[in-house]
Amino acid sequence: MIRTTHVGSLPRSAAVSDRLFAREKGIALDEAEYHRVMEEATHAVLRRQKEVGISLPSDGETSKISYATYIKDRLSGFEGDSPRRPPADLADYPSFMERLSKGGGTPTYRRPCCTGPIAVVDRRPMERDIAVMKAAMAGAGYAEGFLNSASPGVIALFQVSNYHRTLDDYLHDVAEAMRVEYEGIVAAGLILQIDAPDLGLGRHMMYRELSEEEFLRRAEIHVEVLNHALRNIPGDRVRMHICWGNYEGPHTHDIPMAKVLPVLLRAKPRALLFEASNPRHAHEWAVWRDAAIPDDYVLIPGCLDSTTNFVEHPELVAQRIERFAGIVGADRVIAGTDCGFSTFAGFGAVDPEIAWAKLASLVEGARIASGRLS
């Protein structure tokens, strides 16, 4: 049976989002009630995934305001806000970028700068996430699940350092601090998912002035730093997500998968979640067909687009799965999504109920493909 999963973030309730943003603004909250709401919401999102039929669930990133800036509550050295820089493709079309902004298509939240030494100052949020996830998995009947954690590169992508002498110094300090979270998740028996949009989106944001070759060298350094942070963790307990930005836009500056794939394959995680359904990257299945893929490598292609309210037909999902199964074998393919459905709390291009309908279609498509591949 082809297994199913997703990138991690799932629609959060208004009760969750309101509390996350209240805390972000420094509004005093009842701590016990805050954690009760987060815990109940996590249990609910695990139950919903079980009802839909998802094989490998997450906690929906319920307790995090976003997939990268949450680290400010766990590490020292972060405060204030970082300057915004739009992706290069949106800068090419200012009228469209303005429309996105006016229509609420660009979420507003704090991206703290690094202003001092980085160290782990509070393990409790991580430990609480792990404990709640494991309890929710048990309650929903799951034996296996994953938790997301930001890569050093994506932390640096959104949160600049005004403290470090060089970017590489910053990356290494972040990596050493995040190593505690990486190892903690795996030690708890969960799968670690490294979120690394810096290896795709970074090309047209963080490194937009560089040539492709210069970017690829920077991407190699990001992977080297990540591998060092993962040095104590078996590669088969880690999966990695790359994307070019979870937004509807031209994406005309996305670096092709063919260019970046050799760098991705050097990363320690033995499974990769990648965009394979949206109109800019759906054709790149052929890159995998022509690549030399390690025998222990698991592909988790996006079989759903996470920026459109179209509900993909299960037959289309099945065809997408079969295409990748024909490359590496059905036992090395897990059906996934292009990206998350609520990358930032309270924000998502896809209506929450439609997001669940899309996941149900993913499960049905996997069932169809499994029948044909058996």
Image (cartoon, rainbow, N blue to C red):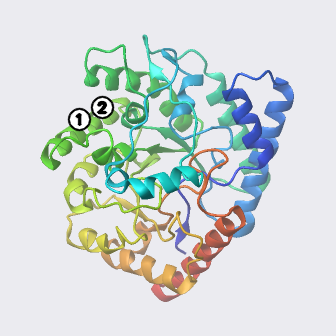
Q: Are marks 2 and 1 in contact (CB under 8 Å)?
A: yes
Residue in the picture at 20% in, 43% down: 215
Is residue 233 depicted above or below 368 in this figure? above
Quadrant in which residue 287 is drawn: bottom left
Where residue 242 appears, as percent x and y from the top left, is 39, 52
Label 2, label 1: how far apart the Cα atoms are: 6 Å
Q: Is residue 102 above or below residue 233?
A: below
Q: Which residue is mark 2?
A: 225
For label 2, the crowd category at 10 Å Cα-Cα, with few meaning under 14, some 14 to 19 and many 20 or more, is: many
Instruction: Provide the residue designation for mark 1.
Output: 221
| SS assignment at label 1 | helix
Q: Quadrant of the N terminus?
A: bottom right
Does 317 appear above or below 61? below
Picture residue at 67% right of the left edge, 64% below the top = 351
194 sits to left or right of 210: right
Q: Mark 1: give few (<14), some (14-19) or many (20+) Cα within 10 Å.
A: some
Q: In this image, 252 relative to 10: left or right?
A: left
Secondary structure of the residue carrying numbered label 2: helix
* Residue appearing at x 51%, y 56% in the figure: 99
- The residue closer to the viewer here, 75 or 92, is 92
Q: Residue at x 42, y 53 (%)?
A: 245
